[in-house]
Amino acid sequence: MNFQINNKEELENFVTHNWNKINQYFDEHYSHVPVPFYNSVDIRESLNKFAPVDNNLYPAGFNNICTLDFNITAERIKKEVLALNPDTKKVALIPESHTKNLFYLDNLYSLHTLLSKYDFEVDIISLDENLFEDSDELDLVSKSGHELKILKAKFEDDIYSKNGIYDLIVLNHDQSSPIEIDWKKVEKKVVPTPRLGWQVRTKGAHFLHYKTIADKFCEEFSINPNLLQAKFNVAENIDFSTKEGLEELAKSVESIQSEVGADKKIFIKANQGTYGMGIMVVDGPDEILSMNRKKRNKMDIGKNKIKFTSVIVQEGVDTVLTHDGGPAEITIYLIGGKPVGGFLRANPLKDASGNLNARGMVYQKFCISEIHEGFDHKAKEGVYSTIARISTIAAGHEILNIQNQD
């Protein structure tokens, strides 16, 4: 098939000169799906393509949003909160339970600040009774020295704390260890939906939706779809501890390499889970069949002791981005489907084809407000935002599927 846009330079030029048309396209498609309250999208840029490699519906890392973008982010959050409930006064923020992760507490402090910047009364609350001993509150200090208070919450027809019930509940908990309540009985609005945590969500389903949306977008604007996505497939029924299913996994690796080239590295990621766990990078199928016990153990169990039995096999996208000499990738944050900021994740201990979300990673704030000055920067911002918005529509279809099951 012939396309008008066939390389990165043509894509960047098109995005720069057709930004309003592109955003009108996305706004129209947003009107047909429930858009996540917030999400973040990890994006890799290689010599010949841009591709999303993850979409997080309960993102951490809000402390990495730069000062210039912070007020815009807060304004977007206020707009989304009032759109959900114009009478909102009190907001509850439900975090993860790993309160010893001081960097996560920095995120929590920033998210609390963003939510409360425009006069909402915001409490951080938790339904995890193990966090509380003889008190109904927990005082913590983040890595940067910020003080936080988590209130003990209960569920009886609705979620409440000693400060009463709330008008809106914001979830910052990916539920890889599910919160054991019947969410359908919670009367107040909970965003993002608690029913699409890693207890049910899969990366394979997300990228199937992404491919469908990206292909339609590319057809609309005559763009070669290979410029905006990585090849992938899904391997099921794997037990890394017993080696069951490894032969089929090796075939999946071989299948992707037959499409992208035998010299390309392949990412294997747990189909459910986050925090960079359950990820390995291989040169080919033989590496799967010869995995030692240490590597198999690493792939077997993830965060909160989730056992990985399904993986997504994804074309490796060798990043061309660098920071302080180390390879880097972009993460874009979105509020209500609109990009508001992001960061560069770099890792000097890895090469351009490696998993950067691992030991040694560092963060550099990526200020959208700062990069309107140069033509090239404006083009990059537009392309990253385009990919992030396609991924957000895909997440909207995931939410729609869950809602249609009711």
Image (cartoon, rainbow, N blue to C red):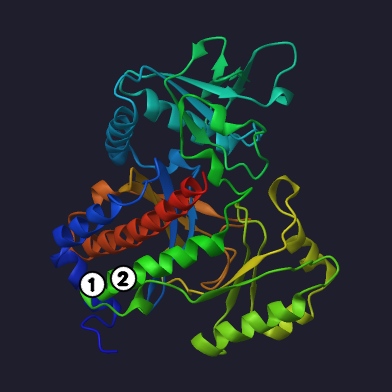
Quarter of the image where the N terminus is located:
bottom left
**Mark 1 = which residue?**
220
Q: Is residue 194 above or below residue 160?
A: below
- On screen, residue 256 versus residue 130, left or right, reads left
Q: In this view, does 255 lie above or below 126?
A: below
Q: What element carries label 2?
A: helix
Dot 1 amino acid type: Glu
Q: Is residue 218 above or below residue 304?
A: below
Q: Distance between the residues labelled 2 and 1?
A: 6 Å
Q: In this view, does 132 lie above or below 203?
A: above
Q: Which residue is drawn at 55% across and 60% down?
A: 203
- On screen, residue 355 versus residue 388, left or right, reads right
How many numbered marks have been drawn onto this rendered protein structure? 2
- Residue 372 image offset from top left, x and y in percent: 19, 54
Q: Can residue 200 be seen in this view?
A: yes
Q: What element carries label 1?
A: helix
**Mark 2 = which residue?**
216
Q: Which residue is drawn at 46% across and 18% down?
A: 166
Q: Nearer the viewer, residue 350 or 390?
A: 390
Q: Is residue 44 visible?
A: no
Q: Residue at x 35, y 20 (%)?
A: 88
| Badge 2 vs badge 1, beta-carbon distance below 8 Å | yes
Q: Residue at x 58, y 65 (%)?
A: 355
